[in-house]
């Protein structure tokens, strides 16, 4: 029997979110609870378990899982606790292991440890020894570091954005791990770092130019490679090795891996200008919305909790009020103090509240708004995007004349219609819907006449030069002018 261990540690952070992530933000599952947590979920772990569980000669050992919504930098004590528990569980089950599947995101960041995934992989390698294969799955927004590459055997990376292939990616990782164990495949990994950070609709893999690069990676996987990917990093995770990078993994063919990784990186660099977000001023978007004959959406990608933002931006709300937008508006916002006051007052109460900026007041000064409490809730619903449960804390639906605010207590992924439908509101019934996710429009709001990606402040703004990167390598496109790309191929194992 093959004895394969399963680990999970996933979170994506924005270094520009002033609110640190606490340990309590993580859902922890050990042993059989890890299987149960993913049995019906749209996750990489689910995909790996489906493949591994179908083998009669494989014993799946669920070891430890930790998963949190995107947020600010992870507190040092929280990372120490997660690391300690994860490694203790791994040591308990390491004896006789034939392989390890490790589900990671790739864009974590902790106080005092800017490469948590590399740290965990290095520690896992130290426990398992040099010969046990370790295969990971990664988000294409992951930041693949040299320490990660030195301590993993291979990886599988998402092929879609917006992400629709969680299960498939986990399944590919599991099949790759089994191939290494069953046939003795010897992965060689070639990667080329590209000094570019990109954002915008050209990254949508079904319609944008990035999609053609990903389709080439999939062709390589079907023909000459064990795995291939073009990772674009998470521009908001300001860490030393932040960049875009190509990765090609072959079965011992160093020359092919190097050649294809280089070609992919050069092709990506040529397209970099196209992969900048076309932002619209808030005033311009509001004026255009006033003349629309069907619903429109404003994408507030700058305050996307799914990318690590705090979710409490009131910038669009302020603009709509100041410019007197007359249509019916539906928008979410994080504001726990406002929710608590609404619950204390009860349904039907009229209140003067300071809305927004409860987490990031320096960026979003609280905005006085007169509201009526229309509904109160407990903030639990099932995400359309992955089938997982949201836990947004207590909630309140507040009406400010023509504007309906769905106010939640804590940031959760707002990548679909779940937050609206759970509170009795169908976005189709409104003239303007604010979406706090860069990718939600293309999947769940295509009924809108037009989508405006508005240029407003936030910890995940696509206006990347304004964020204030201080740690990542420079020069970096588009943070700096006249960036020169001199490609170098790195090979792992060295």
Image (cartoon, helix red, strand yellow):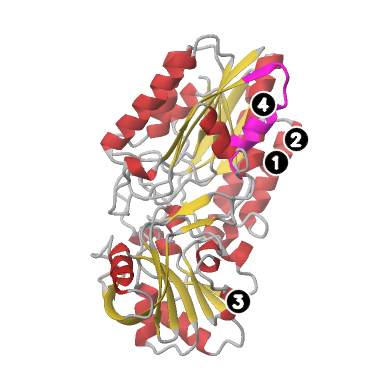
Q: Nearer the viewer, mark 1 or mark 4?
A: 4
On the rendered structure, is 404 left or right of 164?
Answer: left
Q: Neighbour class for label 3 at 10 Å: few (<14), some, many (≥20)? A: some
Q: Does the magenta stretch include residue 245?
A: no
On the rendered structure, is 411 left or right of 355?
Answer: right
Residue named by callout 3? 428
Q: Is mark 1 on a helix, strand or loop?
A: helix
Q: Neighbour class for label 4 at 10 Å: few (<14), some, many (≥20)? A: many
Query: Residues at badges 3 and 1 in contact (C-beta under 8 Å)?
Result: no
Q: Neighbour class for label 1 at 10 Å: few (<14), some, many (≥20)? A: some
Q: Which of marks 3 and 2 is in front?
A: 3
Extreme residue in the top direction: 96
* One can see residue 320 in this view: yes
Q: Distance between the residues labelled 4 and 2?
A: 21 Å
Dot 4 or dot 2: first in sequence order is 4
Q: Position of residue 219 (x, y in %)?
A: 73, 40
Q: Is mark 2 on a helix, strand or loop?
A: helix
Residue named by callout 4? 52
Query: Residues at badges 2 and 1 in contact (C-beta under 8 Å)?
Result: yes
Q: Where is residue 193 in the image (x, y as percent from the top left)?
A: 49, 39
Dot 3 or dot 2: first in sequence order is 2
Q: Which of marks 3 and 1 is in front?
A: 3
Q: Position of residue 486 (x, y in %)?
A: 48, 41
On the rendered structure, is 266 left or right of 243?
Answer: right
Image vertical order of residue 348 relative to residue 276, above or below: below
Number of the label disc, if any, that sits on residue 222: 2
Dot 1 or dot 4: first in sequence order is 4
Extreme residue in the right direction: 223
Q: Nearer the viewer, mark 4 or mark 2?
A: 4
Q: Distance between the residues labelled 3 and 4?
A: 42 Å
- The magenta stretch is 42-59
Residue named by callout 1? 218
């Amino acid at each position: 029997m093959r004895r394969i261990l399963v680990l999970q540690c996933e979170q994506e952070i924005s270094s520009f979110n002033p609110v640190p992530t606490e340990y309590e933000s993580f859902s922890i599952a050990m042993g059989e609870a890890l299987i149960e947590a993913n049995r019906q979920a749209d996750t990489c772990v689910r995909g790996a378990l489906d493949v591994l569980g179908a083998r009669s000669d494989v014993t799946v050992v669920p070891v430890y899982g930790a998963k949190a919504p995107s947020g600010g930098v992870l507190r040092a004590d929280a990372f120490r606790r997660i690391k300690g528990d994860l490694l203790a569980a791994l040591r308990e089950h390491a004896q006789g292991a034939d392989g390890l599947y490790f589900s990671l995101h790739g864009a974590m960041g902790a106080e005092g440890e800017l490469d948590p995934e590399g740290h965990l992989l290095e520690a896992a390698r130290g426990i398992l020894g040099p010969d046990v294969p370790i295969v990971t799955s990664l988000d294409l927004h992951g930041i693949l570091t040299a320490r990660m590459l030195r301590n993993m055997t291979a990886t599988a990376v998402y092929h879609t954005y917006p992400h629709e292939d969680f299960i498939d990616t986990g399944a590919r990782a599991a099949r790759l791990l089994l191939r290494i164990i069953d046939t003795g495949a010897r992965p060689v990994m070639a990667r080329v770092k590209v000094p570019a950070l990109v954002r915008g609709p050209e990254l949508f893999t079904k319609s944008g130019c990035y999609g053609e690069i990903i389709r080439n990676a999939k062709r390589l996987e079907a023909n000459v490679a064990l795995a291939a990917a073009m990772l674009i990093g998470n521009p908001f995770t300001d860490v030393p090795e932040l960049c875009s990078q190509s990765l090609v993994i072959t079965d011992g063919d160093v020359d092919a891996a190097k050649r294809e990784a280089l070609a992919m990186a050069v092709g990506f660099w040529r397209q970099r200008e196209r992969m900048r977000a076309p932002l619209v001023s808030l005033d311009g978007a509001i004026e255009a919305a006033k003349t629309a004959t069907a619903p429109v959406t404003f994408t507030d990608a700058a305050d996307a909790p799914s990318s690590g933002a705090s979710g409490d931006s009131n910038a669009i709300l302020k603009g709509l009020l100041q410019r007197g937008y007359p249509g019916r508006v539906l928008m979410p916002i994080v504001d726990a103090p406002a929710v608590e006051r609404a619950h204390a007052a009860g349904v039907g109460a009229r209140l003067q509240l300071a809305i927004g900026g409860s987490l990031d007041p320096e960026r979003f000064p609280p905005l006085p708004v007169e509201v009526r409490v229309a509904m109160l809730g407990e903030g639990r619903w099932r995400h359309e995007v992955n089938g997982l449960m949201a836990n947004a804390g207590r909630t309140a639906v507040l009406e400010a004349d023509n504007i309906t605010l769905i106010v939640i207590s804590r940031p959760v992924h707002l990548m679909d219609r779940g937050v609206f439908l759970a509170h009795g509101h169908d976005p189709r019934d409104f003239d303007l819907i604010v979406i706090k996710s860069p990718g939600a429009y293309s999947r769940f709001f295509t009924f809108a006449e037009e989508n405006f990606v508005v240029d407003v402040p936030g910890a995940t703004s696509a206006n990347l030069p304004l964020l204030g990167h201080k740690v990542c390598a420079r020069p970096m496109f588009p943070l700096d002018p006249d960036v020169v790309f001199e490609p170098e191929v790195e090979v792992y194992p060295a």
